[in-house]
Amino acid sequence: PVQTSGVRTPSNTCDLRGKRVEEALEATELFLDRMLLRDEPVAFILHGHGTGALKEALRGWLPGCGYARGWRPAEAAEGGDAFTIVQL
C-alpha cells in the first residue's frame, strides 16, 4: 500500500484545473521536481472532476514518471477524487 499521508497545504498542492493535458503533465513534472528538491514526502495534485481527462492522463502518466514512488486517489476527507496524492 502507498504511504501517502500528510496535510494538504498550498505549498504541497499543484492545481491543474483548466489546463490542457499536455501543459498539466508538464506542470506536474516541474512541481514534483521542486517537491523532491525540498525533500517533501507527499504531493497533492488537484485535477478536479470535469470530463475526467486530466485525472485519467495524470494517473496514467504517474507510474512511469520517475518521481512518484506511489500514488492513490484522495479519500473523501482529503478532498475526494478531485485529488491524486503522490508519494515522493
Image (cartoon, grey):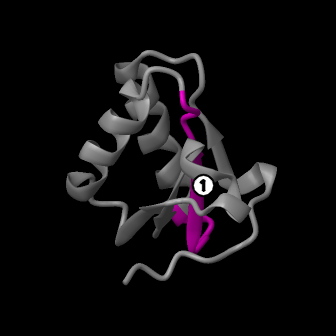
Q: Residue furthest front?
A: 76
The residue identified by callout 1 is 44
- Work out whether 58 lies above or below 6: above
Q: Residue furthest right?
A: 9
Judge from the rendering whether residue 21 lies leftward or rightward of residue 3; answer left or right: left
- SS assignment at label 1: strand
In the rendered image, which quarter is residue 64 located in? Answer: bottom left
Residue 56 placed where, x, y %? 33, 36
Q: Residue furthest left?
A: 64
Residue 11 placed where, x, y %? 75, 53
Residue 68 placed where, x, y %? 37, 63
Q: Quadrant of the N terminus?
A: bottom left
Residue at screen point 47% across, 53% down = 33
> Neighbour class for label 1 at 10 Å: few (<14), some, many (≥20)?
many
Residue 75 placed where, x, y %? 60, 63
Residue 44 forms part of the magenta stretch: yes
In the rendered image, which quarter is residue 66 located in? Answer: bottom left
Number of marks present in the image shown:
1
- Work out whether 19 lies above or below 11: above
Choose between 26 and 63: the one closer to the eye: 63
Choose between 37 and 20: the one closer to the eye: 20
Q: Amino acid at mark 1?
A: Phe
Residue 88 forms part of the magenta stretch: no
**Residues rendered magenta in the picture:** 36-49
Residue at screen point 37% across, 22% down = 21
Residue at screen point 42% across, 21% down = 23
Choose between 12 and 53: the one closer to the eye: 53
